[in-house]
Image: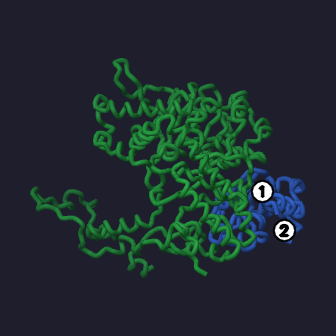
Chain colours: A green, B blue
Amino acid sequence: MNLNEKIRKATTHISQNEGLIFEKSSPGKKGYKLPPLDVPEVDPAELLGEQAREDLGQMPEVSEIEIIRHYTRISTWNYAVDHGMYPLGSCTMKYNARVNEYVARLTGLAEAHPYQPERVTQGALRILQMLSEQLIEITGMDAITLQPAAGAHGELTGILMVRAYLESRGNPRKKILIPDSAHGTNPATAAMAGYAVENLKSNAAGMVDMASLEAQVNDDVAALMLTNPNTLGVFEQEIHKIADVLHAKGALMYMDGANMNALVGKVRPGDFGADVMHLNLHKTFSTPHGGGGPGSGPVACKKILEPFLPTPVVITKKDGTLGFDYNRPQSVGRVRMFYGNFGMHVRALAYIMANGPEGLRLTTEDAVLNANYIRKKLEGIYDLPYSTPTMHEVVFSDRLQTPKGVKTGDIAKRLIDYGFHPYTVSFPLVVHGALMIEPTESESKEELDLFIDAMKSIAEEAEQHPEIIAEAPHNTRISRLDETMAARKPVLRWKPPAAAAGK
Amino acid sequence: MAYPADYKYTKEHEWLKVEGNVGTIGITDYAQNSLGDIVFVELPKVGSEIAAGKTFGSVESVKAVSDLFAPVTGTVAEVNEALNTAPEQVNKDANKTWMIKVTLKDAGEANGLLSAADYEKFVAEESGN
């Protein structure tokens, strides 16, 4: 049979073979030409003594065009949201609008330096202040820091603030509760902040089990770390009651804002009882993600936690100009050099202002609509372990395909042949053999239909020709990698052929 | 039967074999099968204390890192060092590949664990088969 009969989006991958840059090297080749020396020559050995280095080891020696071709070719091996749909659940791989990039490249912003005096950086400070105000409005919180560089970094900052707050009241407490559907970074954060992690079970609907919560919250619990909607895409319907149970015992509610793309413009965590939360600008607010980062993970909090925010914070001074306040004795301290990833703040503000309140609300609606369109079209073809309504993402399991020996990881590999980035595989852990799909609002109905057709076609293949899926991908530059061997015996360093032969 | 009748089991998928005051601990065949190819096993040091229901190490597979939960309380007497270089042994024969041996604090504690038949029933419910 023809392997590619039903593949509409992709044919074979256009790429050329490409070795390592080291393998292209030949001695003496250069990518630069220096002007004649017009200052007295200095002998490095005389200047540096024993520190002068004669042998630079094996460095690649290549020409400029070879470097350009090398990296350009490698870049064509990437899959990006600019190529097509990237339904990697929980990651919100939405389109990064070009208006963000345009604004971030304006000379005054692109060339701003953090050591410039405040009087010439009023515009940059105003951007930080405006973004802060708008994120506070969106989250319903009272104060914010833009410093953290990513989501997990924001989590750690937030939990350190919780600890500082509780310490200021005399007892930092011992435990953090984390639901079994949580992101893996949550327990890691709690442990890094010196807390013991206690698991909280989900109920049959995929939500926090209120009885377990009430039984587990006591004077040792510092906080609950909750993702809402959770990693099953389910909105915690009793979220305000969860907050009440915690607050009654003096514990706080940390909200992991990774899934804010389902809430912006609709509900505000500050209104349903969250005390502190982080946002992922690189998810919800359309700044570059993954290899294109860096990320940004602002932390917003209620008034009670404001004194503990990282220093400095942007303030309006008595004369009406903006500046930084470093005099914050209760602060957890600085968590990132300067003021965080400023370029991302510019992009996120551009995204928020380009959309406006109505645009952001529509974005949320479209994100939820797209995920539910996929859910409806694939339900029954793939097993849906939780029937609870879902928001911006949908989690299937591979239960209908496993009798033929086809697992979630195999389906994901076959999806690559169909021209899509895989969904998130085997997560959340509460679903055995999970397929976690998050299309985001960026996709048109046409692209969603292509994806749905691909998933249906793969399900048919799983029935009739499971071997095609077991061996996928077929149309890529390289075929399936031995992931087990890569993990058990990783090769992490290039070694010169002579040294390798001598070993 | 996939689960030896002379072992005891936890709902977290560890097995325990008791001989006198020594308990031998590993993970079940169901656990290794669910995890997929195991690439790393992290175990405690000889002499460290483990407590029933608490984690004593972790197994990393190509899919995820999972905690290992102690079936009983005791002191680690021996660690299967072979797993440092050959974690795949767990996949090959989970029933015979032990991870740690512990000196039991209370040999009677094992009576509270699942029998092979109960464990098999539990797994059938959990996996929905």
Inspect this view and state whether residue A41 appears: yes
Which class describes the residues within 10 Å of circle 1: few (<14), some (14-19), or many (20+)? Answer: some
Disc 2 secondary structure class? loop
Residue wearing tag 1: B12
Establish if A467 lies above or below A101: below
Which quadrant is home to the C terminus of chain A?
bottom left
Report, in whole angstroms, how far the alpha carbon at label 2 lies from the one at label 1.
Answer: 14 Å
Relative to A31, A200 lies left or right? right
Q: Residue A388: percent from the left, percent from the top?
A: 73, 47
Q: Nearer the viewer, residue A395 or A296?
A: A395
Residue at 33% over, 32% down: A123
Disc 1 secondary structure class? loop
- The answer to whether the residue labelled 2 contacts the one labelled 1, judged by CB atoms less than 8 Å apart, is no
Q: Which of A3 and A197 is in front in this view?
A: A3
Relative to A135, A237 lies left or right? right
Amino acid type, label 1 = Glu
Amino acid type, label 2 = Tyr
Relative to A501, B64 lies left or right? right
Q: Nearer the viewer, residue B34 or A54?
A: B34
Q: Residue A116: percent from the left, percent from the top?
A: 29, 35
Q: Nearer the viewer, residue A93 or A325?
A: A93
Residue wearing tag 2: B3
Q: Residue A284: percent from the left, percent from the top?
A: 52, 44
The residue at the far front in this view is A446
Sooner in the amino-acid sequence: mark 2 or mark 1:
2
